[in-house]
Amino acid sequence: MSKLYIVPTPIGNLNDMTFRAIEILKTVDLILCEDTRKTSILLKHFEISAKLKSHHKFNEHKTSHDIINEIKGGTQIALVSDAGTPGISDPGFFLVRECIENDIEVETLPGASALIPALVNSGLASDKFVFEGFLPPKKGRQKRLKLLSEETRTMIFYESPHRLIKALEQFSEFFGSERKASVSRELSKMFEENKRGTIQEILEHFKAKQIKGEIVIVVEGNTAEKPKKNKKNKNAEPEI
């Protein structure tokens, strides 16, 4: 029986593609991808001629059954996303779970993911962190932010350019305007930008410019000490 390969692709700079990733994509029979047009650019650059098939969040539940049967039939298949590692805020989880349930081996290559360079670049604590991905756009967003206001670990978020200002304003409201943060934009690309400071400082910076590209926001955890509860002395005499 064949296996499913999970192959990370560069988040921007094509030179970040690994030799092993190129080798596997050249040997498989079929490559599943989000957008065949974007992946075609990558394949052409590395002279890879494997067949492409669309596999994205809108069709993964319908197509996974056929993919499982193809793998069982001996077809060598790799899954890629438009950028980064499949399954990290991208399609991949559902197909991997289906493969595991069908006793199909899954081999995941290490590789690019925007959250790690953004975290290291931020200068914030990286020994313990929580990845939140994209926050809910509407329903449940404020409830999630209220819950995260007590989070003590460094937090990492993905955000779209047109929602960055709104996100920073809400972070200021729920986390405090003086909380330290970092916004990374267009990581590994020609116009990469990393803006660090308080949430208020970063908000003012991006309000004054046109925002483009992929966004990663890193926010310091809550470092405020909680007030200690007074423990009653069981042996103390009762007050009159």
Image (cartoon, grey):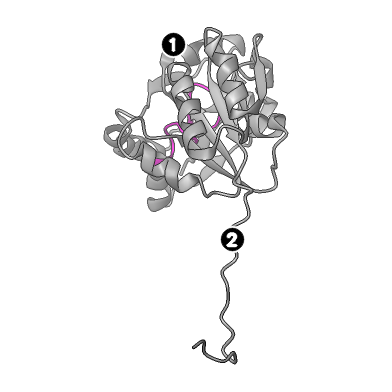
Q: Residue 206: x and y, percent? A: 56, 15
Q: Considering depth in this image, is 112 or 106 the residue closer to the camera?
A: 112
Q: Considering depth in this image, is 77 or 98 the residue closer to the camera?
A: 98
Q: Secondary structure at mark 1?
A: helix
Left or right placement of residue 237 versus residue 162 in this view: right
Residue under numbered circle 1 = 37
Compared to residue 126, the image places residue 137 above or below, namely above
Residue most extreme to the left: 62
Number of the front mark, 1 or 2: 2
Q: Secondary structure at mark 2?
A: loop
Left or right placement of residue 196 versus residue 6 in this view: right
State which quadrant residue 27 falls in.
Answer: top right
Q: Residue 233: x and y, percent? A: 59, 85
- Looking at the magenta stretch, what is its main secondary structure? loop
Q: Give the class, few, some or many, for how many residues have Cα within 10 Å of label 2's Cα (few <14, many ≥20).
A: few
Task: Identify which residue is drawn at 54% across, 22% down.
Answer: 215
Q: Residue 186: x and y, percent? A: 60, 16
Residue 76 appearing in the image: no
Amino acid on which the number 2 mark rests in the picture: Pro
Q: Considering depth in this image, is 41 or 166 the residue closer to the camera?
A: 166
Task: Identify which residue is drawn at 37% across, 37% down.
Answer: 141
Point out the stretch of residues depicted in magenta. 78-94
Compared to residue 81, the image places residue 3 above or below, namely below
Determine which of the numbered discs, if any, sits on residue 227 in the image: 2
Q: Residue 184 colored magenta?
A: no
Determine which of the numbered discs, if any, sits on residue 139 in the image: none
> Sequence-wise, which precedes: disc 1 or disc 2?
1
Q: Residue 79 colored magenta?
A: yes
Q: Residue 48: x and y, percent? A: 56, 16
Amino acid on which the number 1 mark rests in the picture: Arg
Residue 57 appearing in the image: yes
Label 1 and label 2: CA atoms lie apart by 56 Å
